[in-house]
Amino acid sequence: MTLRELINSVDSEQYNESPLYQKLRETKPEYGSNKRIQVKLVDGEIAITNVHVGSMGDIITYPIDVDPDLNISKVQLLDAILHELSSNGFSDSEASDFWSDFDNLQKAKIIR
């Protein structure tokens, strides 16, 4: 399952207050990559890797590999991924501003 498929498979009403969820839901898939989102348990915590690379259009096409020993629901999985994508502490307005800037190609050129 890809991140896009996961997003489309959960009840969207419970994420009405999440600008990050809304942005990911609206994002059109792009080229994708051979990268995969990795989900495993590390020291009793869910660890998510490979979500901080590429564009949002790429990230939503990444397949999700969940450790077979990890018993996790789709909602728990999506919550953990959204938490990791939000850099564990952005406020909703900061997250919205970040993702608006993330898709701004003019700013991307300036940063590079």
Image (cartoon, rainbow, N blue to C red):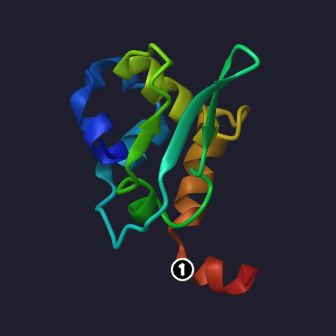
* Identity of the residue drawn at 31% across and 46% down: 4
Image height of 102 relative to 6, above or below:
below
Q: Nearer the viewer, residue 32 or 29?
A: 32
Q: Quick one: which residue is furthest to the front in this view?
A: 69
User: Which quarter of the image is occupied by the N terminus?
Assistant: top left
* Identity of the residue drawn at 59% across and 64% down: 101
In the displayed structure image, the side of residue 20 where residue 109 appears, left or right: right
Q: Position of residue 71 (x, y in %)?
A: 45, 13
Q: What kind of element bears circle 1?
A: helix
Q: Image quarter for residue 75?
A: top left
Q: Nearer the viewer, residue 32 or 79?
A: 32
Q: Nearer the viewer, residue 108 or 72?
A: 72
Image height of 49 relative to 45, above or below:
below
User: Which quarter of the image is occupied by the C terminus?
Assistant: bottom right
Q: Image quarter for residue 108?
A: bottom right
Q: Which residue is mark 1?
A: 105
Q: Image quarter for residue 107?
A: bottom right
* Identity of the residue drawn at 38% across and 40% down: 22
Q: Nearer the viewer, residue 104 or 39?
A: 39
In the displayed structure image, the side of residue 28 where residue 68 appears, left or right: right
10 Å crowding of disc 1: few (<14), some (14-19), many (20+)? few
Q: Position of residue 62 (x, y in %)?
A: 40, 54
